[in-house]
Amino acid sequence: MPHIMIAGGGIAGLTAALALHTAGFQRITVVETVRDIQPIGAGLNIMPNAVRELDALGLLDRLEERAVRTRELRYYHCSGGLISRDRRGLGAGYHWPQLSIHRGELQLALAEAVRTRLGRGALVGGVKVTGVEPLPDGRPRVQLEHRDGARRGKASLEPDVLIGADGIRSAVRAALNPGEGEPPWNGMLIWRGVSRIPAHRIGTFMFIAGDDRRKAVVYPLTEPAGDTGEVLVNWALVMPADSVEDAWRGDWNRRVPVESFLHHYEGWEFDGVSVPDVVRAADTAYEYPMVDREPLARWSHGRTTLIGDAAHAMYPVGSNGATQSIVDGRALAHAMALHADPADALAAFEAERRPAMSELQQSNRQLGPEVVISLAHQRAPGGFSDIDEVIPQAELAEIAARYAATGAFDPGTVNRGSPYDLATRSPR
Ligand SMILES: Cc1cc2nc3c(=O)[nH]c(=O)nc-3n(C[C@H](O)[C@H](O)[C@H](O)COP(=O)(O)OP(=O)(O)OC[C@H]3O[C@@H](n4cnc5c(N)ncnc54)[C@H](O)[C@@H]3O)c2cc1C
């Protein structure tokens, strides 16, 4: 029975642990640098192709308790003009919903399931992976740093398989690709947060609005609370750093006052939802650089591979980063169950997933489906009253369909069912 170590207890690592366990693997350890996982972060949209995989893992009911269904996505030009409105999830013909959920809630739900199903010792907090080297027999030697407690200090372990799920600044990826350096930055900044808003001041839909430089993403994360009638709302704003007076100082994730950037979005109102009102209601705003990773020529090296952002970090466009990280976990477990030799399994996993993920990374650099906003701005910078005169419906539909096909989340493909279900599950 192979011992599988997963570096990183984020969305990718925890899903992979659950998927491997469901596929019959018993000896799984997730090491996570954070000692106690906290419900931090902002909102995520999880697309139906990933919700299908979470359902196969028996997690859908639990997640639906903590999420709301995303029923509609609207794109607007910053002038207020509606570019498109599309149904999402069940209303779009998928057999599974699309979910809006706080990242922290999703991570905590996955962590709880890991502890319940695999045992409390399967998720070890306060342990950082600092390096990896291959042993002559093909197994990885993993260097670890215990950050607190009685075992504080350095150690090394030799699992049979190592999965690098340690995010965009992955230590596993760095060990496999020495000299790669920091994630490349495209010069854009992202401000992100959550706000509590009275339900009547926010739509039930998700929207993305902007022009050729700025963008706002807003969507509810909860139903109205019984006592206050308030809704938790996720928001993210994007614009080039060179137009920000208080120049970005290179901090990775810094807290900033909303007044430092909000004036760039004054007057942004979309079917009654005011972006400044939503953002002003936030306790905290965080500023990030918009970074991704170059597509890699290789993820798997013998018995070590990468999943999630460690493998294919992409710009936050099209709701795909966490979505595809979840699919990775299931694809990996499926390959591991089908191949007796772990190196063959990791190679098969990569052969299936890497080409499509590289294409998605490239597509997101060209704005993915959100390109319709900059197209509308290029063709009608002052706004429009009839989108058909600016972007014909057929062109809008073609852009959306092309992007969905790249990530294999078009309804036809998703509704065929999971390609990762295993007929039999024997303990391994
Ligand atoms: C503004 C914004 C909006 C987004 N919106 C969406 C969306 O709507 N839908 C969507 O699908 N995706 C979205 N994403 C992307 C999504 O957040 C990521 O793709 C996803 O969280 C990646 O999951 P992961 O588990 O691979 O990495 P992470 O979530 O980064 O998890 C990595 C884990 O590894 C741990 N770790 C790191 N280094 C080490 C180490 N050396 N040793 C041990 N542990 C380590 C970390 O503490 C962390 O817990 C968005 C991203 C941004 C920035």
Image (cartoon, rainbow, N blue to C red):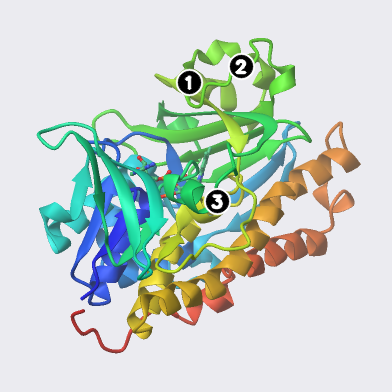
Q: Secondary structure at mark 2?
A: loop
Sequence order check, earlier mark of 1 and 2: 1
**Image vertical order of residue 251 relative to residue 158, above or below:** above
The answer to whether the residue bearing label 1 lies less than 8 angstroms from the nearest atom of ligand 1 is: no
Q: Which residue corresponds to the image point at 66% horizontal and 22% vertical from the top-left?
A: 265
Which residue is tagged 3?
Answer: 177
Q: Amino acid at mark 1?
A: Arg
Residue 322: tell me if it is visible: no
Which of 221 and 109 lies nearest the eye of the viewer?
109
Quadrant the N terminus occupies:
bottom left
Location of the C terminus by quadrant is bottom left
Q: Nearer the viewer, residue 426 or 43?
A: 426
Callout 3, which amino acid? Asn
Left or right: 392 as drawn, with respect to 39: right
Asked if the residues shown at circle 1 and circle 2 are in contact, with their CB atoms under 8 angstroms apart, the answer is no
Q: Which residue is mark 1?
A: 254
The residue carrying pointer 3 sits among few (fewer than 14), some (14 to 19) or many (20 or more) residues within 10 Å by Cα, namely few
Count of number-bearing discs: 3
Judging by the rendered image, the residue that carries numbered circle 2 is 261
Left of 189 or right of it: where is 285? left
Specify few, some or many for label 2: CA neighbours under 10 Å numbering under 14, 14-19, or 20 or more: some
Q: Report, in whole angstroms, how far the alpha carbon at label 1 lies from the one at label 3.
A: 28 Å
Apparent side of residue 227 relative to residue 6 in the rendered image (left or right): left
Q: Marks 1 and 2: which is nearer the front?
A: 1
Residue 20 percent location from the top left of the image: 29, 70
